[in-house]
Image (cartoon, helix red, strand yellow):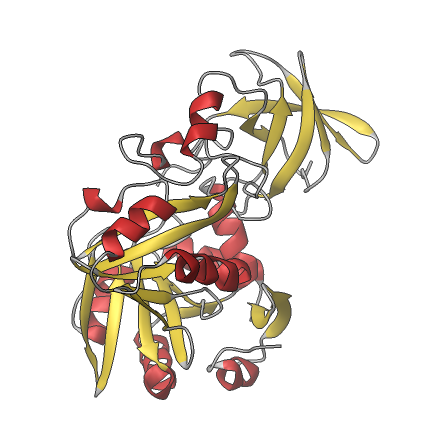
């Protein structure tokens, strides 16, 4: 099973590991709660090297992205990043993706690690012979530095701090780096790419500057508090961005795979992703059944919110509930009251 080039660093830090997206990655160091708090209160650092990344360059690269992805990359300029999705012909989400645009015809496509091979193969299959597609994940590391103190710390360590959804390049020591003002926690910060040869030095520099190592367990509770979707939970091949409440990711003024199916679905949703809370220690878990006054469904992601101090969850409900409907969730054989809320759970 693949590991990060920093695996030995995580071992020395006595990390616990898990299988994630086919990779062996740290799930926690000290405790999930402590790492979660570090990101919310100061600054945490994640090794997210399992995430996919490949480069698309050459004449026709922009047209290729516009046809394959539902957001419109032509709407952003070089030096920016964009959240988007690759859909199938039925409008289902094959993956949600971040794109870094470096130049007019040079991009990094960053799918989830689980879907990296499939999304890269899809681009290869439809690329004209004027477009080159190259793996940039091999022999490299991707770090996410997140938290209210992250901008100052990042500037001190690498000499610059990209703005939100901005992309910048630079050098750390003698090693080229690229960074974007993106993340998965709702906090300020960025994600930084560096070759494996310079990765340990960069990791150590951030630790010395005050970043707390954090792992996938805390990353999941942090993203849940923001209501960010996770592929395989809120998103999959049978779920459209409209059902997931992510219609803003769809740019309707260009042609892309899945557009026809989405147009047929607009205004005619038979199910919808909702967010809800529970009181106290009643913790909603994935797979639990929820019931509204007019419909039912199952939890896609749920947990106890360390920041808010109560249960939070998302679930698909069919038919979509009307404003003001009450709901319950079955927890250990009991119907527990729940409250439908708007996302995000936590206002940052």
Residue at (40% x, 52% y) in the render: 97
Q: Look at the image and tell me whether residue 278 can be seen.
A: no
Residue 315: horizontal and vertical position, in percent? 61, 32
Total numbered labels: 0
Q: Is residue 258 above or below residue 103?
A: above
Which quadrant of the structure image shows residue 128?
bottom left
* Residue at the extreme right: 333
Q: Quadrant of residue 252?
A: top left
Query: Which of 135 and 194 lies nearest the eye of the viewer?
Result: 135
Of 209 and 24, the residue lying toward us: 24
Residue 158 location (% of width, % of height): 21, 74
Which residue is farthest front?
A: 129
Residue plotted at (52% across, 38% down) = 92
Q: Where, by quadrant of the figure, is residue 276 drawn?
A: top right
User: Does residue 299 show up?
Assistant: yes
Horizontal relation, residue 279 to residue 306: left or right: right
Residue at the location (68% across, 27% down)? 297
* Quadrant of the image containing the C terminus: top left
Q: Nearer the viewer, residue 175 or 260?
A: 260
Residue 178 drawn above or below residue 275: below
- Residue 310 location (% of width, % of height): 58, 37
User: Which image quarter is the N terminus in?
Assistant: bottom right
Where in the figure is residue 268, as x and y percent of width and height?
Answer: 51, 16
């Amino acid at each position: 099973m693949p590991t990060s080039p920093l695996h030995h660093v995580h071992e020395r830090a006595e990390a616990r590991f898990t299988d994630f997206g086919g990779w062996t990655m740290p799930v926690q160091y000290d405790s999930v709660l402590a790492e979660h708090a570090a990101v919310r209160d100061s600054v945490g650092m994640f090794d997210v090297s399992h995430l996919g990344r490949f480069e698309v360059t050459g004449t026709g690269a922009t047209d290729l992205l516009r046809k394959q992805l539902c957001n419109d990359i032509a709407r952003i300029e070089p030096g920016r990043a964009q959240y988007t999705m690759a859909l199938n012909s039925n409008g289902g989400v094959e993956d949600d993706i971040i794109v870094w645009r470096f130049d007019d015809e040079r991009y990094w496509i960053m799918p989830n690690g689980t879907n990296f091979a499939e999304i890269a193969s899809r681009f290869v299959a439809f690329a004209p012979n004027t477009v080159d597609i190259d793996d940039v994940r091999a022999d490299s590391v991707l770090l996410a530095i997140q938290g209210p103190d992250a901008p100052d710390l990042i500037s001190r360590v690498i000499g610059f701090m990209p703005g939100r959804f901005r992309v910048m390049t630079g050098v750390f020591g003698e090693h080229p780096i690229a960074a974007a003002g993106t993340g998965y926690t709702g906090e300020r910060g960025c994600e930084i790419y560096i070759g494996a040869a310079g990765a340990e030095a960069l990791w150590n520099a951030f630790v010395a500057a005050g970043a707390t190592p954090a792992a996938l367990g805390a990353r999941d509770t942090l993203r849940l508090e923001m209501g960010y979707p996770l592929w395989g939970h809120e998103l999959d091949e049978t779920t459209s961005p409209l059902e997931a409440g992510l219609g803003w990711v769809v740019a309707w003024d260009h042609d892309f795979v899945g557009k026809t199916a989405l147009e047929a679905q607009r205004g005619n949703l038979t199910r919808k992703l909702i967010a809800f809370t529970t009181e106290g220690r009643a913790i909603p878990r994935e797979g639990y059944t929820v019931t509204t006054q007019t419909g039912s469904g199952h939890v896609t992601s749920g947990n106890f919110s360390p920041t808010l101090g109560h249960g939070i969850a998302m679930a698909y409900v069919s038919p979509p509930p009307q404003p003001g409907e009450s709901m319950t969730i079955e927890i250990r054989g009991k119907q527990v009251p729940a409250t439908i809320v708007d996302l995000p759970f936590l206002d940052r």
